[in-house]
Image (cartoon, rainbow, N blue to C red):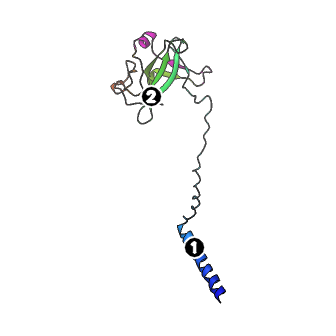
Amino acid sequence: MQRTARLLTTLVVILFCAVAWAADTPPAPAAPPASAAPPVSSVQTVEPNAAEAILGSRVIGPQGKDIGRLVDVLVDNNGHPQAAVIDFGGFMGVGNRKVAVHWSTLHFDPSDGKHQVQLDMTPDQIKAAPEYSNPDKPAPVVTPADTTTQSQTQPQTQSH
């Protein structure tokens, strides 16, 4: 009987320790919830002769002479292009300067195999234009003489 009492006491102590240990053990982490499938999107095809990428394109003047490269587009708060930043002159990045020109001064012809952008400004107008140097400050945008007064105000733009 003494042996049974000892065995029973030992079992009670072991059971008590197991219950205490289980209470101190943090619960196992729950399985992560199943992620929802992303919404299905449609794919639209744009033919090469219907649109083209313009960043990095060569810019030509009214006489067809290569004058720079389009390096950025400034858009308004609605995402509409307001100006293009063109890198003019220089050789291998030395002596060049960037000028922001009004979007309406540019002409694009996606069917042109050379992928050039034409700028309707004379070399003298470009030379007289202020340099665009800091995207965090209002951009001095060179506008053609016939744009509306709304375009001549410096729009709040974002560089993209």
Residue 129 against residue 137 in the figure, above or below: above
Q: Nearer the viewer, mark 2 or mark 1?
A: 1
Assign a secondary structure to mark 2: strand
Mark 1 residue crowding within 10 angstroms, few (<14) / some (14–19) / many (20+): few
- Counting every numbered tag in the picture gives 2
Q: Is residue 86 magenta?
A: no
Q: In screen coordinates, is 8 left or right of 138?
A: right
Residue 8 against residue 31 in the figure, above or below: below
Query: Which residue type carries mark 1?
Result: Cys
| Residue situated in front as seen by the camera: 20 or 132 | 20
Position of residue 65 measured from the top left corner of the image (x, y, whole percent): 54, 11
| Residue situated in front as seen by the camera: 156 or 95 | 95
Q: In screen coordinates, is 89 left or right of 134?
A: right
Mark 2 residue crowding within 10 angstroms, few (<14) / some (14–19) / many (20+): many
Residue at mark 2 to residue at mark 1: CA–CA distance: 71 Å
Q: Is residue 115 magenta?
A: yes
Q: Residue at x 37, y 31 (%)?
A: 156
Give the labeled residue for mark 1.
Answer: 17
Position of residue 71 measured from the top left corner of the image (x, y, whole percent): 51, 23
Position of residue 87 measured from the top left corner of the image (x, y, whole percent): 49, 18
Give the labeled residue for mark 2.
Answer: 74
Quarter-of-image position of residue 9 = bottom right
Q: In screen coordinates, is 105 left or right of 152?
A: right
Q: Magenta residues?
A: 111-128
Which residue, as the protein is rendered here, is positioned at the far top? Answer: 124
Quarter-of-image position of residue 7 = bottom right
